[in-house]
Image: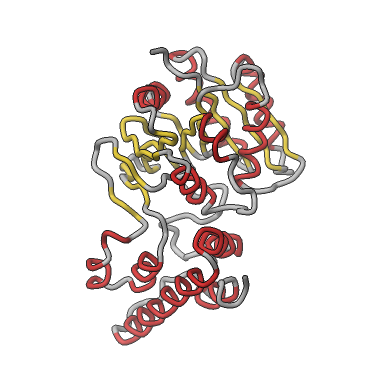
């Protein structure tokens, strides 16, 4: 069996220099996999990103395999990816695989072949997520379970006993160093088979950012496709450069409104409003328990500012 053709889609929003570095890492893969192509969608950055990226493509001679597609609006992650995917699907020779790749990533040599070969050899797999390596070189060996009321209970409580009891329900799932089926994988590096788009449609553009890949993997599962974590294909990921939500920063940033709205949409869309309200209550009650315990223990408050009030304001309890 021949290796399936792959097309990389990168959505940029004001990270032009990072996109250029990502394309540099892809250039190595293009030399090893001549059929590899890439499209960069600029989500109306308005900061000169288009010029930076276009100049780099021209200066490095990448035009044979990379192109730039400006979007007139910043419609979010799903919207930007869909813009490129639609164009590619309309071609007479659409790619077999679409690699949705964050601009703040660097492709580790061999990742393209590892991911495409895996999907060639596993026809039941519709989506494959690579391993992510943090900027300091440490492996981030996680995939995810679908969010539920119990996972929201665990997330809000942050108590050892509760976390141990609900360990199998936590959204975050530590993975072994072997390929395995999972519920969903990070949209920072996610390969989607063309047949998945053809069977379930494109990603839901009602999500501006966050939960769109969770929802998409769920729709794929409902259509009979599996999602796999594939650790032998890996990328370096400098998380949060486009979103502003960066782990490890000294002071936690306020969680943006679109995160709460995306979370609410996921629960309401896939489980109904009553379930979404119960999930909200589960998190809010256990979070309040955590806050009380923290005060009693005189621990520092390291939560993002206005976390509870922002959560409630954008919850299914208050709105549909």
> Split into 4 quadrants, where in the image is the C terminus?
bottom right
Q: Which of 295 and 150 is in front in this view?
A: 150
- Residue drawn at 35 percent across, 55 percent down: 172
Residue 309 in the image: state x and y as whole percent.
55, 78
Q: Is residue 299 above or below residue 267?
A: below
Q: Nearer the viewer, residue 170 or 160?
A: 170
In the image, farthest residue toward the right: 72
Coloured how? secondary structure
Q: In this view, does 21 lie above or below 155?
A: above
Q: Is residue 184 above or below residue 177?
A: below
| 210 on left or right of 164 | right
- Residue drawn at 50 percent across, 46 percent down: 219
- Residue drawn at 47 percent across, 26 percent down: 25
In the image, farthest residue toward the bottom: 296
Q: Is residue 32 above or below residue 176?
A: above
- Total numbered circles: 0
| 130 on left or right of 25 | left
Q: Which of 267 and 38 is in front in this view?
A: 267
> Split into 4 quadrants, where in the image is the N terminus?
top left
Residue 195 in the image: state x and y as whole percent.
52, 30
Asked where in the image residue 155 lies, by quadrant, the reply is bottom left
Q: Which of 209 and 146 is in front in this view?
A: 146
| 127 on left or right of 39 | left
């Amino acid at each position: 069996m021949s290796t399936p053709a792959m097309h990389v889609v990168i959505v940029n929003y004001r990270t032009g220099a990072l996109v250029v570095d990502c394309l540099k890492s892809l250039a190595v893969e293009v030399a090893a996999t001549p059929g590899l192509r890439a499209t960069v969608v600029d989500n109306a950055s308005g900061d000169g990103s288009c010029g930076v990226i276009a100049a780099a493509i021209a200066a490095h001679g990448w035009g044979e395999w990379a192109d730039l597609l400006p979007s007139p609006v910043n419609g979010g992650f799903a919207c930007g990816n869909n813009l490129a995917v639609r164009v590619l699907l309309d071609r007479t020779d659409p790619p077999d695989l679409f690699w949705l790749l964050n601009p703040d990533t660097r492709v580790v040599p061999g990742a393209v072949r590892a991911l495409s070969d895996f999907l060639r050899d596993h026809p039941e797999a519709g989506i494959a997520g690579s391993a992510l390596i943090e900027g300091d070189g440490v492996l981030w060996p996680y995939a995810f379970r679908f969010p539920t009321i119990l996972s929201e209970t665990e997330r809000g409580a942050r108590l050892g006993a509760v976390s141990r009891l609900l360990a199998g329900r936590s959204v975050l799932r530590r993975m072994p160093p072997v390929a395995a089926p999972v519920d969903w994988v990070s949209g920072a590096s996610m390969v989607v088979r063309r047949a998945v788009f053809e069977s379930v449609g494109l990603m839901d553009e009602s999500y501006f950012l966050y939960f769109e890949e969770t929802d998409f993997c769920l729709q794929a599962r409902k259509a009979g496709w599996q999602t796999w974590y594939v650790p032998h294909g890996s990328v370096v990921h400098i998380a949060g450069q486009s979103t502003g939500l960066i782990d490890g920063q000294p002071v936690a940033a306020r969680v943006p409104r679109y995160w709460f709205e995306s979370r609410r949409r996921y629960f309401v869309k896939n489980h109904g409003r009553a379930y979404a309200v119960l999930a909200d209550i589960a998190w809010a009650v256990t979070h309040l328990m955590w806050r009380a315990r923290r005060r009693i223990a005189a621990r520092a408050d390291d939560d993002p500012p206005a976390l509870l009030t922002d959560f409630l304001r954008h919850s299914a309890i208050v709105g549909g």
